[in-house]
Amino acid sequence: MDRNATKEKSYLIDSLSQGYLPEPEELITLLEGGIDEYLFQKANEMTLERKGKKVDIRAILEFSNYCRCRCTYCGLSAENPNVNRYRLSEEDIVKTTLEAAQAGYRTIVLQSGEDLFYTEEKICKIVRKIKAQSDISITLSIGERPYQELSAMRKAGADRFLLKHETSDEDFYKEIHKGDLLKDRVDTQKNLKSLGYETGGGFMIGIPGQTLQMIAGDLLLIREIGCEMAGIGPFISHEDTPLRGQKSGDPLLTRRTVAIARLLLPDANLPATTSLGVIDSSQLDLIFKNGANVIMRKVTPWSERTKYEIYPTNFGEEKDIKTARTELEKYIESLDRIPV
Ligand code: SF4
């Protein structure tokens, strides 16, 4: 890269660090690479300034793998007949969450496919029961729901809501979400914000058909919505989907995107996604120096855990919740970070 281009890119990175709102074309120049070391350094500085060395460990409980949607990239799609479907009972969801709280977790993500079996009443009841017995923060990740339902769940005690938008390109959204509308998703995210949820968004890197222009749009969308959390991880193909056999997303481009997200959203929580570790565990180590400050650990009962596969996952060996958490804390400390 010539000297002028390097100078322009480093000037842009400095401007982003100072709150500049870029044009999509400017973000594309950074996504193309060429000045990664400086980008990662600035993202790391911003992370240390806003978050310190702390890495937030969050528990994730996948309570149902039923889903009414047909996303082309997802192993849990309603169109996949090979999924061994399960639903956890309300009692098991509450019991597992309380076990996670006892093991030291301060946040639980209750995640499922879009499964309307869990009505507003059921979710509210679960949230209230958990809140009556612990002070763990509850993040819901259950797909799109109407405003009234989201409002009731918030009143019941849900603190956060995770709803990835996956792509900011309307046509591409229709393609990968098979006919659903991006507008509905973004409207739901705006509803969540207005209801006082801490709102999480996010998207994949490298899904076939995605362009750098789209990634730039994704970054600007999470900034526009004001997401307090953004999950950005590489695409991994699942063999039971129409995208079987396709190349995985590029870990380096993923890290670049997370670093830019850190500069655009200095206070956001940016997880090191599991999918990055599945592709290459060394990339997972690096991402904590590129802007990430959160990691999630599954607490889903082992009897069901391997049935929740959005993409092929390395589940590792069976361990209880406390042991798995202790090991994760040691891993974070080995990266010169402080687990919280
Ligand atoms: S990505 Fe989510 S909404 Fe889409 S099929 Fe998978 S679980 Fe369902």
Image (cartoon, rainbow, N blue to C red):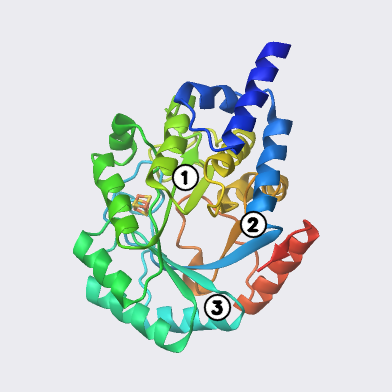
> Which amino acid type corresponds to the residue marked 1 in the rendered image?
His
Of the pair 5 and 287, the residue shown nearer to us: 5
For marks 1 and 3, the one nearer the N-term is 3
Helix, strand, or loop for circle 2?
helix
Image position of 176 with respect to 185: above or below:
above
> Which amino acid type corresponds to the residue marked 3 in the rendered image?
Ala
Q: Quadrant of residue 142?
A: bottom left
State the image coordinates of residue 243 (x, y, percent, origin top left). 42, 37
Q: Nearer the viewer, mark 2 or mark 1?
A: 2
The residue under label 3 is 100
Q: Nearer the viewer, mark 2 or mark 3?
A: 2
Q: Residue at x 27, y 64 (%)?
A: 150
For marks 2 and 3, the one nearer the N-term is 2
**How far is the residue under mark 2 from the one under mark 3?**
24 Å
State the image coordinates of residue 125 (x, y, percent, origin top left). 30, 81
Q: Residue at x 49, y 73 (%)?
A: 303
Of the pair 221 and 276, the residue shown nearer to us: 221
Q: For the residue with label 2, is its CB less than 8 Å from the closest atom of ligand 1?
A: no
How crowded pointer 1 is (Cα within 10 Å; few <14, some 14-19, many 20+) is rated as many
**How far is the residue under mark 2 from the one under mark 1?**
35 Å
How crowded pointer 2 is (Cα within 10 Å; few <14, some 14-19, many 20+) is rated as some
- Circles 2 and 3: CB atoms closer than 8 Å: no
Q: Quadrant of residue 83?
A: bottom left
Quadrant that contains the C terminus: bottom right
The residue under label 1 is 238
For marks 2 and 1, the one nearer the N-term is 2
Image position of 78 with respect to 27: above or below:
below
State the image coordinates of residue 255 (x, y, percent, origin top left). 62, 39
Quadrant that contains the N terminus: top right
The residue under label 2 is 51
**Residue 234 seen in this snapshot:** yes
